[in-house]
């Protein structure tokens, strides 16, 4: 590894959820992926996750892979580089698995803040975030709807910009589909009001720039309609005619490759089916959260990766939440975290052998 290669920061997410466990499990499954990584959070929380996995029985029908050593109750700092944030938690202060708490929310927020400041100062090259719980974050006093908005605000603050001057979008991607959302964490009624020509055009611009930077070529962006059958020529709604189509035409005039609006119930199938063909759809631009995320997650959250477009740094995340019902049981799947780490390395240009 070259000395000038910066590490990747991995934030632990909500300590009452599965974030710490999947970090440790991912490390046990693929320790080479954690080369030159820093886990940002609390050492006692990570120690507990290590102990949970060490005590978890493994089914005899599924033998442990040769490259997955059984965790043993040793200090995690011997195997993982841990960046302590805030005052270290004592054993009796650790958040209870599966319970919403201000302590967990504050720790998650502190981890994100440390990682964002580090990446903005050039001390790390990318951030991978384990899932946080929005209610716990709110209990800590921060009123962000989620990771995306908090990262946007912190980055804008560092750059001395307003949030409006640093627009971001959420991309969910797996090996078969990519989708970007025009609106993110908003109630559906508010999201529909936020579907405007300007917001759609801005989404297309951000997506075009990001995909061009990632791949070196102009992407084909397919825009989903809002209404059933993309409005059926105005019979089922006029948003496609009055809002979505004008945004598409402006984007085309700016040199982007954009098609649509397509019927939302078929555009994802088309993108998946034609992905290896010439002129295939590279990204589906969806109007609201569930429209874009249900198709991706249906294909399997173990493959999915959340990528924030528009930030001045690389940020990826697993395509799932805190899974409070699984926390502390040692059974959570770490595949999506490993995929998020691999994508972060690729986008940041940091290979394992760098």
Image: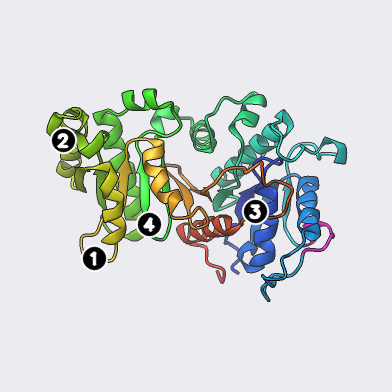
Q: Residues within 10 Å of mark 2 (few under 14, many from 20)?
A: some
Q: Main secondary structure of the magenta part?
A: loop
Q: Position of residue 84 (x, y in %)?
A: 75, 45
Residue 219 visible? The answer is: no
Whichever of callouts 2 and 4 sits on the residue coming sooner in the sequence is: 4
Q: Residues within 10 Å of mark 4 (few under 14, many from 20)?
A: few
Q: Secondary structure at mark 1?
A: loop
Which one is in front in this view, the residue at disc 1 or the one at disc 3?
3
Q: Are marks 1 and 3 in contact (CB under 8 Å)?
A: no
- Residues shaded magenta: 71-78
Left/right placement of residue 188 relative to residue 280 reads right
Q: Circle 1 is placed at which residue position? A: 277
Q: Quarter-wise, where is residue 186 in the image?
A: top left
Q: Secondary structure at mark 3?
A: loop
Q: Circle 2 is placed at which residue position? A: 232
The quarter of the rendered structure image containing the C terminus is bottom right
């Amino acid at each position: 590894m070259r000395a000038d290669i910066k590490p990747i920061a991995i934030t632990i997410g909500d300590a009452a959820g599965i974030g710490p466990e999947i970090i440790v499990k991912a490390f046990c499954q693929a320790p080479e992926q954690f080369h030159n990584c820093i886990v940002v959070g609390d050492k006692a929380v990570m120690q507990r996750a290590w102990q949970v996995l060490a005590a978890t029985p493994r089914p005899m029908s599924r033998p442990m892979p040769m490259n997955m050593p059984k965790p043993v109750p040793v200090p995690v700092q011997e195997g993982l580089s841990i960046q302590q944030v805030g005052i270290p938690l004592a054993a009796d202060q650790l958040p209870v698995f599966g319970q919403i708490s201000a302590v967990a929310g504050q720790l998650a927020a502190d981890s994100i803040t440390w990682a964002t400041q580090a990446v903005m100062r050039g001390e790390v090259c990318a951030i991978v975030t384990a899932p946080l719980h929005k209610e716990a974050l709110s209990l800590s006093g921060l009123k962000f709807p989620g990771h995306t908005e908090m990262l946007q605000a912190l980055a804008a603050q560092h750059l001395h910009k307003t949030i409006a001057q640093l627009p971001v979008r959420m991309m969910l991607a797996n090996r078969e589909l990519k989708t970007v959302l025009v609106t993110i964490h908003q109630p559906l009624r508010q999201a529909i009001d936020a579907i405007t020509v300007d917001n759609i055009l801005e989404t297309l611009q951000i997506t075009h720039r990001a995909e061009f930077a990632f791949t070196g070529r102009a992407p084909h962006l397919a825009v989903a309609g809002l209404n059933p059958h993309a409005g059926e020529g105005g019979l089922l709604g006029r948003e496609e005619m009055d809002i979505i189509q004008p945004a598409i035409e402006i984007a085309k005039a700016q040199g982007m490759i954009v098609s649509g609006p397509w019927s939302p119930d078929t555009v994802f199938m088309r993108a998946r089916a034609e992905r290896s063909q010439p002129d295939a759809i590279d990204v589906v631009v969806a109007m609201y959260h569930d429209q874009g995320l249900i198709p991706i997650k249906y294909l399997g959250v173990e493959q999915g990766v959340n990528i924030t477009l528009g930030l001045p740094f690389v940020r990826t995340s697993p395509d799932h939440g805190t899974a409070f019902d699984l926390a502390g049981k040692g059974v959570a799947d770490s595949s999506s975290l490993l995929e998020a780490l691999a994508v972060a390395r690729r986008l940041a240009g940091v290979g394992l052998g760098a």
